[in-house]
């Protein structure tokens, strides 16, 4: 088997919301491949970003913590500029920051709708736009973007009207960006994980009724773990995926296959 050690050496990756959960797992995986990582976190959550940076540095990698609120364009610009100034280039963007507010469709409030769409879709788009401008203008030009969507961008599920709308938007936005930026070349793909077992999701996923319903829809009969998602991101970013752009890759134990 070919060794993948160092396949991202010399490259810089911005990973949004990388102080916890999937973003942190992806940051650690890409650092293992040699990428220098800009770990972004919301202002006020710098301690979380610092934890990820420390873990990367302890493993011999290189990382910097940057504040970012994707709802604020000036914050996006400052973050992308800081990543470029720190490392000289921006080669990879993992648009991971996201949130969910669970409400039945009858109960969705305007505030909740706007929050979910602002972070998951609008913020993700402008992060991609600003990062891709740097990828276009640097020498040599090029880059790779992974948008973290969800199986909820491919199928519907109760209590997730805004979330499903946002993630469905991410999946189709990914296709547009892949098309427009293909010749730069910037590859743009979406990841669509199923439910991932983390300390935050454990109460829901371990609930016999709620979790049981989700498991019954999953042929593999298990939830994902952060490493499953990180390995899929690693593939999409790797040179081996050089012909892969515009896809939405389910990481779902078969949920969307049946
Ligand atoms: N956990 C799951 O089961 C699951 C499944 C499918 C997809 N996802 C997606 O994966 C991504 C990561 O989720 P997670 O489970 O690791 O959650 P998480 O809450 O651990 O991580 C989300 C990150 O986004 C950051 N964030 C939130 N609002 C932000 C904003 N306005 N600006 C910048 N950063 C912001 C948070 O600070 C946090 O670091 C999300 O996009 C989520 O929708 C998660």
Image (cartoon, helix red, strand yellow):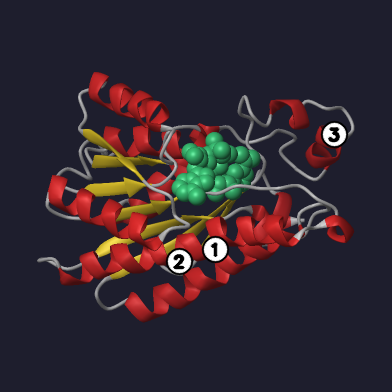
* Quadrant hosting residue 24: top left
For label 3, the crowd category at 10 Å Cα-Cα, with few meaning under 14, some 14 to 19 and many 20 or more, is some
- Tell us which disc is closer to us: 1 or 3: 1
Residue at the (39%, 51%) spot, across then down: 94
> Relative to residue 152, is residue 129 drawn left or right?
left
Q: Which residue is mark 2?
A: 125
Position of the N terminus, as image quadrant, is top left
Report ligand 1 position as a quadrant: top right
Image coordinates of residue 224 in percent, x first then y, are 62, 36
Image coordinates of residue 90 in percent, x first then y, are 22, 55
Find the distance from the CA under tag 1 to the CA under tag 2. Answer: 6 Å
Q: Which mark is residue 109?
A: none
Q: How many marks?
A: 3
Q: Which residue is mark 1?
A: 121
For label 1, the crowd category at 10 Å Cα-Cα, with few meaning under 14, some 14 to 19 and many 20 or more, is many
Q: Is mark 2 within 8 Å of ligand 1?
A: no
Image coordinates of residue 127 in percent, x first then y, are 38, 61
> Relative to residue 20, is residue 109 drawn left or right?
right
């Amino acid at each position: 088997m070919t060794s993948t050690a160092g396949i991202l050496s010399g490259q810089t990756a911005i990973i949004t919301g990388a102080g916890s959960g999937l973003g942190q797992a992806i940051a650690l995986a890409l650092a293992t491949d040699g990428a220098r990582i800009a770990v972004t976190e919301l202002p006020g959550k710098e301690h979380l970003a610092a934890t990820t940076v420390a873990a990367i540095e302890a493993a011999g990698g290189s990382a910097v913590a940057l504040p970012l609120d994707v709802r604020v364009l000036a914050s996006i610009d400052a973050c992308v500029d800081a990543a470029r100034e720190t490392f000289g280039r921006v080669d990879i963007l993992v648009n991971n920051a996201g949130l969910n507010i669970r409400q039945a469709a009858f109960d969705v409030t305007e505030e909740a709708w706007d929050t979910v769409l602002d972070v998951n879709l609008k913020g993700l788009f402008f992060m991609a736009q600003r990062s891709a401008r740097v990828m276009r203008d640097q020498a040599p030009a090029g880059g790779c973007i992974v948008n973290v969507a969800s199986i909820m961008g491919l199928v519907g599920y109760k209590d997730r009207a805004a979330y499903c709308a946002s993630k469905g938007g991410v999946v189709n936005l990914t296709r547009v960006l892949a098309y427009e930026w293909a010749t730069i070349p910037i590859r743009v793909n979406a990841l669509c994980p199923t439910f991932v077992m983390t300390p935050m999701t454990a109460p829901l996923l371990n609930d016999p009724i709620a979790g049981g319903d989700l498991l019954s829809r999953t042929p593999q009969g298990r939830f994902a773990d952060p490493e499953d998602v990180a390995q899929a991101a690693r593939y999409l970013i790797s040179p081996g995926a050089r012909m892969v752009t515009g896809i939405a890759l389910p990481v779902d134990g078969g949920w969307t296959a049946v």
